[in-house]
Image (cartoon, rainbow, N blue to C red):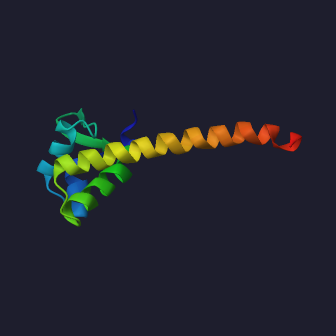
Amino acid sequence: MKNENLVLIAQFCMHHNVELSFISSLHQFGLINILELEDEHYLSIDEIIEVEKMARLHYELGINLEGVDAVANLLKQIATLQQELMMARNRLDTFAPLF
């Protein structure tokens, strides 16, 4: 993975006014991956949006980490179900002209 696709966790925390312990807790819950390169800890760009969502849930709505974990898992399930529904609709559309 290239370094330009990584964000230093300390910079992320400073920019978003998030505690380092929060990021560490998300990692311990298995919600995010932390990459370590040359004694520095990074987040991948792909995870930044998810971390921002979880930070808003925790800091703005006061949801504890267990709740953030539950919400994150439910959102993943919803996304999976939406993809399955879209695939089913697309398959059904192939038969729609017959009716």
Report whether 96 appears left or right of 42. right
Examine the image and state in which quarter residue 35 appears.
Answer: top left
The spot of residue 84 in percent (x, y) is 57, 38
Say if 73 sits above or below 18 in the image. above
**Left or right: residue 53 compared with residue 14:** right
Residue depicted at 27% across the width and 40% down the height: 31
In this view of the protein, which residue sits in the foreground, 85 or 61? 85
Q: Nearer the viewer, residue 51 or 17?
A: 51
Q: Residue at x 21, y 39 (%)?
A: 27
Residue lying farthest to the front in this orientation: 99
Q: Nearer the viewer, residue 96 or 26?
A: 96
Quadrant where the C terminus lies?
top right
Q: Is residue 99 visible?
A: yes
- Residue at 23%, 55% (x, y): give it: 11
Task: Say which of 38 and 76 sits in front.
Answer: 76
Question: Which percent across, then down, holds residue 29?
Answer: 20, 38
Above-or-below relation of 90 to 71: above
**Residue at image coords 19%, 58%:** 63
Q: As drawn, is 35 to the left or to the right of 94?
A: left
Using the rendered image of the protein, determine whether residue 44 is visible from the camera's viewpoint: no
Residue occupying the far left of the picture: 21
From the top left corner, tell me how far across and down residue 51 is, in percent.
Answer: 30, 51
Q: Quadrant of the N terminus?
A: top left
Farthest residue, direction bottom: 60
Question: Could you say where residue 5 lies in the image, as x and y percent from the top left?
Answer: 40, 43
Disc count in the image?
0
